[in-house]
Amino acid sequence: MSAAPPREPVRSRYAEAVQTLTPGYFALVMASGIISVGLELEGFGVLSAVLLWICAVAYTVILVLTLIRLTRFRDAMARDFMDPGRAFGFFTFIAGTDVLGVRLGMAGWPAATAVLLAMAVLAWVVLGYVVPWTAVLGRDERPVVKDANGTWFIWVVASQSVAVAAASLEPGVGDEWRSALALTAVVAWSVGLILYAAVGIFVSLRLMTYPIRPEDLRPQYFVAMGAMAISVLAGARIVEMAGAPMVDATRGLVAGSSVVFWSFASWLFPVLVAAGWWRHFVHRVPLAYEPGLWSVIFPLGMYAVAGIYLGRADHLPIVAFIGRAELWIAVAAFLATFAGMLWHLWTTLVSPRPSAV
């Protein structure tokens, strides 16, 4: 009787998981947090609270694992900063921090929102210069455009998440802080729009200049819609802010632009669905769990919340109706992806597997 193959030690499995942890895993926090916001807006308090707990636990666990990775596997993290396909995933930390902060503010914890916003702004300023330089501009390899991909839109999402968090915090602070929050919100919103235009040009040139293979159209391309949707939400929140010089100077522009951006996000939705159909059904690329799928769930949830909020703020009932319907699509997609993640973690970390010989 032949001996059973040796099993890989549990410690080495966990060490490998931490070493290869994708920088974009905070998209799980973004997805669970924004769907929790949508459920709270629609009055489903219990479901919203469950998603909030998932969001908070996921944020804590991923943050701890990232810090462990920084100390134990610094070389692996440094390589991520040099990789155009992974580096922009670091911006999910900013967006996840802001989304969690916004949801905690809705739960009556404005102090937590303020702390998380301060962390996010600091990270936004630092990573906003570091990541583009290490991953794109500082590399000798040219042309740069060949490396453009959907993850680059997360840079936009990070900027707009700062705007959303600043605008959400504004009603609960004193007059001495309102001007600062208004400045932060309007500047972050404006920077996000310019970045969207720049990233959109780079990604479009990549798609038009180089061959498109089915494996290249990864789930992260859905962030293009999520970035536009969060721009809508940020704009709607800015319009509701109290009078301040920056808000008063841009209120009309922001309000009108938000409707335009929602329209463009709506136009993008079937385009991205068709791309997914082409990838998985026409070319039969297997649809299996990967961390990048959270970059699909977040745009679904963000589009729903943006529609609900914009519809209420600008008295557009059809927009609000579409947002409410989309919310349940996002919930179903979240549950399926969350189940896939749990099964993936079970089979890779808990269930024993043969060790490599």
Image (cartoon, grey):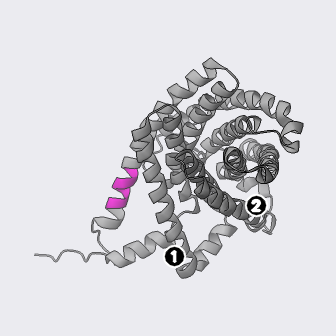
| Rendered-image quadrant of the N terminus | bottom left
Residue at the image point whose x is 31% and y is 78% from the top: 9
Residue at the image point whose x is 77% and y is 39% from the top: 242
Give the crowd class for mark 1: few <14, some 14-19, many >=20 residues within 10 Å.
some
Residue at the image point whose x is 59% and y is 79% from the top: 74
Q: Quadrant of residue 237?
A: top right
**Which residue appears farthest toward the left when viewing the image?**
1
Q: Say whether residue 343 is magenta.
A: yes
Identify the amino acid type marked 2.
Answer: Gly
Residue at the image point whose x is 84% and y is 43% from the top: 244
121 or 179: nearer the viewer: 179
Give the crowd class for mark 2: few <14, some 14-19, many >=20 residues within 10 Å.
some
Q: Say whether residue 69 is magenta.
A: no
Residue 136, horizontal then vertical, whole percent: 76, 62
Identify the amino acid type marked 1.
Answer: Ile
Res. 84 visible in picture:
no
Left or right, 91 with reference to 293: right
Image mark count: 2
Q: Quadrant of residue 225?
A: top right
Residue occupied by mark 1: 68
Residue occupied by mark 2: 128
Q: Give the magenta-colored segment's residue range.
A: 340-346
